[in-house]
Image: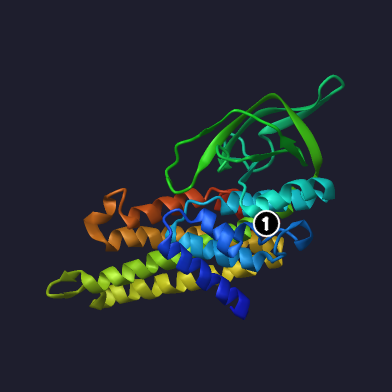
Amino acid sequence: MTFTAEQDALRDSVRKLLDREADPWPELCEQIGVAALAVPERFGGLGAGTAELQVVAEELGRVLADVPFLGSAVLAVHALLATGDDDTCERLLPRLAEGVVGAVAWTDADGRWDTAACTAFGTTASGITVDGEAHYVLHGDEAEILLALAGDSLYEVTDAPRVRTAAMDESRRLARVTFDRTPARLIGPVDVGALRDVACAVLAAEQAGAASRAFELTVEYSKQRHQFGRPIGGFQALKHRMADLHVLVETARSAAYAAPESSRLAAVAKVHCSEALATVAGEMIQLHGGIAITWEHPAHRYFKRAHGAAHLFGSPGDHLGRVRPPLS
């Protein structure tokens, strides 16, 4: 992987800010402009590409940052752009670029990312309304701009009851949004598959970043923990396990940054990065010994992120069908 000087500078700036800020989202938006990265310049943004989004996501994944980057700066921005509605983009994208939180209601109670959660109706008296219940809405409880995918179209919803839902990964903010003949405005059609591919590519970079940091912490611990009078990292068997984890981390990064090239590679990245992070996080718990069963310990936090992230935008199993050729 080769990065430009600008991308390296972006990575360095994000990492330094995350190291010093306990609540990084306001500073990420004001100082670095991460919320504006995917917004075209004509709408008040920076006009960056998917690679820049991935660089930021990788750094956020390293520290398991609880910020609305994936749901707002990636998903909501790309959903609006996909409609081609310039009037709505001129109204909403500058706000998202400034850091106002947006959310896309998309998934049903069974975790299916296929726009089955919501249904839109057109009526002569009150215009369009939306019915249904969307689950696992990224930062949906705090979003000022709420969008809903119903069928293959995107709607702007003025207001709807939402509640934050409990999740295994407490560093990922999820919500349930309920629509009951809720007034909505049709924005336009969306290529849902393409939208999910972008989301998977950025999520894969986040997973690669989390896997990389989990691996680093495990290597550091293996040099500190002693058994039989020597660091456990010096045992040949553990050296082999560390080498295998290193390969997983590097291939995950390669898969993530290749993901934007095609829909198939986005599916490959979703599958491989999910499995890589789960494997590294599991080994992290094992190699940290008994302390890692504590839920607040970093090892357990990476483990929970691994299992939560694996199901975003479809589980690895859901994407395998896009990778494997059909049986004849």
Q: From the top left corner, tell me how far across and down residue 56 is, in percent.
A: 56, 64
Q: From the top left corner, tell me how far across and down residue 193 is, in percent.
A: 72, 51
Of the residues shown, which amino acid type is indicated by label 1?
Answer: Asp
Number of dots carrying numbers: 1
The quarter in which the C terminus is drawn is bottom right
Give the residue number, with chain letter if any, for mark 1. Answer: 197
The quarter in which the N terminus is drawn is bottom right
Residue 246 location, quadrant: bottom left
The foreground one among 18 and 129 is 18
Q: Is residue 257 left or right of residue 169?
A: right
Residue extending farthest top? 125
Task: Identify whether 190 is placed above or below 233.
Answer: above
Residue plotted at (87% across, 21% down) = 124
Q: Secondary structure at mark 1?
A: helix
Inspect this view and state whether residue 131 appears.
Answer: yes
Inspect this view and state whether residue 210 appears.
Answer: no
Mark 1, other Cα within 10 Å: few <14 / some 14–19 / many ≥20: many
Q: From the top left corner, tell me how far across and down residue 282 is, in percent.
A: 37, 58
Residue plotted at (28% across, 74% down) = 237
The foreground one among 54 and 312 is 54
Q: Is residue 239 left or right of residue 157?
A: left
Residue plotted at (24% across, 78% down) = 234
Residue extending farthest front? 30
Q: From the top left corner, tell me how far across and down residue 15 is, in percent.
A: 47, 68
Residue 203 location, quadrant: bottom right
Residue extending farthest right? 124
Q: Is residue 242 left or right of residue 183?
A: left
Task: Identify whether 187 is placed above or below 1.
Answer: above
